[in-house]
Image (spheres, grey):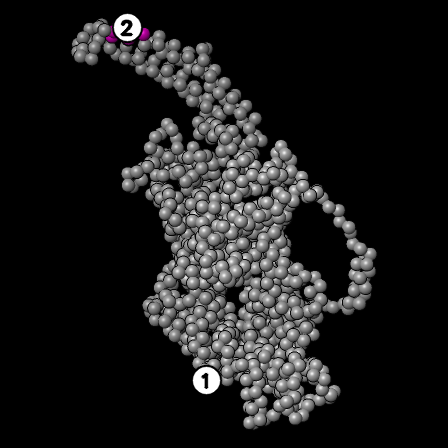
Amino acid sequence: MTSIERTAYPRFKRLITAHELHLFFAPTREEATWAAERMDSDGHQLALLLALKSYQRMGRFPKPDEYPEMVVDFVRRMVELPEGTVPLWATGRTAERQRTEVRRRVGATYDQAEARRIAEGSIRKEAAAKNRPADLINIALEKVVGAGLELPAFSTLDAMASTVRKEVNASICTGIHDRMSAVERAGLLRLLEERDADGTTQYNRLKKSAQSPTWSHFKRLITHLDWVDALGDTGAWMDGVASRKVTDFAGEADAADASELKAYVPVKRVALMACLAHKARMRVRDELALMFCKRMGTKVKRAKEELEEIRLAEREMAEALIGNYRSVLKDIDDGGPAQAALAKADEMTAGAVAALQGLDEQASVEEVARRLDGEVSPAVLALMKALLVQAGGLGTITKTVESFGGFAKQYEQIEKVSAHHGNFWEVLLYGQIGRDRALMFDLAEKLQFTATSEDGRVLAALAHAQRNEAARGEYISAIGEDGRRIDISFATQNWQKAVVDKSRPGQFVRKHFEAMVFTCLAEELRCGDVAVVGSEEYADWSGQLLAWEVVEEKLPAYLVEVGLAEESEADGFDAAFFRRQLEDRLRAAAAAADAGYPDNESLVIDPATGIPSLKGHRSEGQRPSAKRLEQEIKARMPERTLIGICARTAYWVEWWRRFGPPSGNDPKLADPFGRYVLTTFVKGTNMGPYEAARHISGVSGHELAYTANRHFSLVLLNEAIADLVNAHARLDISQAWGDGTAVAADGTHMDTYLDNLLAETSVRYGKPGGIAYHHISDTYIALFTHFIPCGVWEAVYIIEGLLKNSSEVKPTTVHADTQGQSLPVFSLAHLLGFDLMPRIRNWKGLTFYRPSKTTEYVHIDGLFGEAGKNVIDFDLIESQFRHLMRVAVSVREGAISSATLLKRLRSGSHKNATYVAFREVGRVIRTVQLLIGI
C-alpha cells in the first residue's frame, strides 16, 4: 500500500499555519447562517461547517477522527459557538443528507462510478510512462477534480493504481522479454553468475560509471563499449517502451544486486536487466564522447602552454638556429670544406672533360677510345674519384646539420619559432596527441557520428583521415574517394595553413590534418553540430523538439502562462507580432534612458569613446536598531542540534515519506522515519555511513549505506526539498524577507573524489572538485541545487534549476553573476517568462544594439558605437519565429532539457541556425536590461 503522505491526496497536515486556517477554514456569515438554519444544535452545526469547509478545501469528506483539534477549535471560535462545543457527527441516512446539502452548496457532483472510470483510465494511460504509484494516484486526482467530481476514497485509488500498474508493467516486461532472442536472454542472465577478477559479478559492470579522462581509462572505456554492445541490440528490445519507463526500470535494476534480482520472476528479471543494459549502452557513448572532448581540450591547452613556453625560450632557440645557420654557411662559403671539395672535383674531372669535348651522343665506342688515346680506365677512375670528393663535401654539410640534432630537429625548431610569431599553436598539437591517436581512430570507428545539419564537412574529413589511418608518410592525398578535393573550409585559417603545404599541391600534411579533424570533431560535438547515434547527452537534440503542429496547439496557452501575451492577444501572436514586441521594447528602453540621462547623476558617458561609467554609492551601514534586533533574536533563539533539526522537520513536514525503494512501494524497514532521518544527516554532513555508525548507537554502517544506496535518489531528494520549501513559504516570518518572486543563482566549490568524469580542477578556486550550483529564493531558502563540473559555464544550468523547481515558490526574476549569463541564456529566459538580471563584470565593454540603422539618440548614442553599426537583425528573428517557439515550448514541456540545449548553443555553433536566432533575441534582451540598469 502507498502511504497517503507520498501523494497529493488532500488531507490535514500536521503543520497548519494561522494564515492557512483563516484562508481555508474560516466560515463566512452566509455559511454560518446556512448551517444554523439546517441544524438544531451547536454540535451538529459545528459538524456541518467542518464538513463544508473541509469539502471546499479537499473535495472529499474526511472521517471524524481525521479533523485536527486546532481546526475544530478555530471553526468553533469563528462562528462564536460556546467553548467546549464538540462536533456531533450524524450517521446513516442523516449523514448522507448532510453530505448532499454540502455538495449542493459547493456545486459538486457525486458520481463514484464515473470518478472511478476517469481515475482508472488516466492511471492506465499514464502507467505506460510513469512507474511510481504515488505519481499515478496524483494523475488520477487531477483528472477527477478537473471533472468536478467528488474524490473516491484513498484506499480505492491506491488499490486501483496498484492493480493497473501491475498489469501495465507485466505487459511491458513481457514485450521486452519476447523481443529478445533466447541467446540474448541467456547472455544477460549469465551476468548474474559469472564473476570478474575483483570477485563481483559481471552484472556489476553495467552499473559502473566512467573514471577520470586518463589515457588508460579512455582505452578501458572503449573496451567496455565493445562488451556492452555485444549484449545485443537493446534499442530493438525497447521498441515502443516510454523512455521514462526504461529509466525507472533501469533504476530499479541498478539498486538491486545479483542475489536480489534472482528473486524476481524470470520475465521481470530479464526485462529489468535489459533496461539497465540499454541505459548502460547510452551512458558509455555519452561518457566516451565527453572523455574525447575533455582529452582534446586538454591537448589543445597543452599545445597553447607549449607555445607560451616557446615564447619564453624563443630568444635562446632563435640564437641557436642562427648559430646553426652560420655553421652551415661557413661550410658552403669560400674557404669552407664544401667549396674546397667542389674545386678539387673540378680539377680532377678537367682532363676527362677536355678529352671528350666535341663528342655527341651518336659517337661510337671506337671514337671515344681513340680520343682518350686508349686510356679509358684511368679517365673514368679520375671521374669517379672526383664524384667521391664532391659527395664528401656535401657530407660535411650533412654532418654539420646532424651535429645540431638532425634535419628533423631543425625543422621542428623552425616550426616552433614560426608558431610563436603567428600564434600558431595548431602545428604543436599533433605532438601532444601522441599515443591518443590510435584510441581516437578506434573511437571514430566504433561510435556512429551524424551531422545535425546539412553541413557534413567535418565528418567527410574524418572519413578521409580514417581511410589514411595506416599511412606513415608525412603527406597524404587531398583527394577523396569521389575524385574531389576534401573540403577543409570549416577549419580556421591557421589550421588550413598548417594542413596545406604549398610546395605539395594535392596533398595534406598528415599529422596536422589528423589533429585538425579531431579538434574540429570535439568542437562540433560540444556545439551539437555532430551527434552520437545511440547516446543520450550527445544525441541529436533537434530530434527531441516537439513538432510544430503540437507546439501550435499549445502556443496560445503557453504565451499567456509565461507573460509574452495577454489572453486577447494570444491567438494573433505570430512572427510579425513577436518582432514588433521586441522592437517596441528595445525602442522604449532606449528612449527612456536617453530622456532620463540629463537627470541621471550616477551615469556618465564619455563623449569621445562612448564608454559609460557609474558612480559608486556608499552603504549606510547597519543601523543600531538592526544590531539590537539581531542580538535580541539570538538571545531568545534556543540552540538546536543539526540532527535534532532534521528530526523535528521530518516529523512536522513529513519530508521523510518521500524516500523509499525504487519500485515505488512503501519501505519494509522496521523504523523508516528514524533510518531516513539518520541517513539524511549522515549524507548531508558528508560524514560517511561507517564513520557515523561509530558514533550513533543502534545502527550499523551497512544499514546506513544500504538505505542511502537503495532508498535515496536525486529525484526523491528534490521532492523532499520541495516539501521543506513549501512549509517554509507558509511561515509568516518568511514573508518578512521576500515574496518568493526573485531568486539568486551562484555556485559553491565542493570537494569530490577525483576518479570520475565530473571532477575537474577549477580555475576560479584553484583545486579539483565540482560546483554545487544553488538557486536561493529571496525568502532565504535554497529552491534547487545542481552539481556541475568546474569547467562548465554556470549559465547553462541557470534556467534548468528554475524549471526543475517543483515547489510552490515560483520566482520570475533571476539574479546571477557574470557566469550566470550569455546571449542564448538571455533569450531563453525571456521566452520562458523569466527576467534575467545578472551582475556583469566589465559590462562597459559590452555592445549595445540599435533597433535600426537610422536610429540615433541625443544623449546616449555613444553607447551604441558608430552610427549605423551594431543593429539588431529583426528580419532574422521574424524568420526563425517558429523554431524559437518550438524550442521554448519543448523546454517548458520537458521534451528537452534546457541545460542540454544551452550546452549546444555555443559561440562556436557556426552552422547552428538556432544559435544565431537565440543570439539575436539575446542581444535585444541584454541591451534592454543594460539600459534599464543604468
Q: Which of the 4 image quadrants contains residue 849?
A: top right
Q: In the picture shown, does residue 680 fall above or below 72?
A: above
Residue 353, magenta (yes or no): yes
Mark 2 Cα within 10 Å, few/some/many (few <14, many 20+)? few
Q: Nearer the viewer, residue 94 or 746?
A: 94
Q: In the picture shown, does residue 39 fall above or below 523?
A: below
Magenta stretch prevailing secondary structure: helix
Q: Which residue is mark 1?
A: 113
Residue pictured at 43% horizontal, 19% vertical: 396
Q: In the picture shown, does residue 386 fall above or below 246?
A: above
Residue 725 pos. (x, y %): 63, 66
Q: Nearer the viewer, residue 73 or 278?
A: 73
Q: How many numbered markers are drawn?
A: 2
Residue pictured at 46% horizontal, 41% vertical: 434
Q: Is residue 322 left or right of residue 231?
A: right
Residue type marked 2: Ala
Residue 872 pos. (x, y %): 50, 43
Residue 172 pos. (x, y %): 39, 72
Residue 602's mark? Answer: none
Residue 933, magenta (yes or no): no
Q: Nearer the viewer, residue 887 or 312?
A: 887
Q: Which residue is mark 2?
A: 354
In which quadrant is the C terminus drawn?
Answer: top right
Q: Is residue 752 visible?
A: no
Residue type marked 1: Ala
Q: Is residue 126 left or right of residue 642?
A: left
Distance (Cα) linking label 1 and label 2: 124 Å
Residue pictured at 51% horizontal, 37% vertical: 868
The magenta span reads 350-357
Between label 1 and label 2, give the one nearer the viewer. Answer: 1
Residue 554 pos. (x, y %): 45, 63
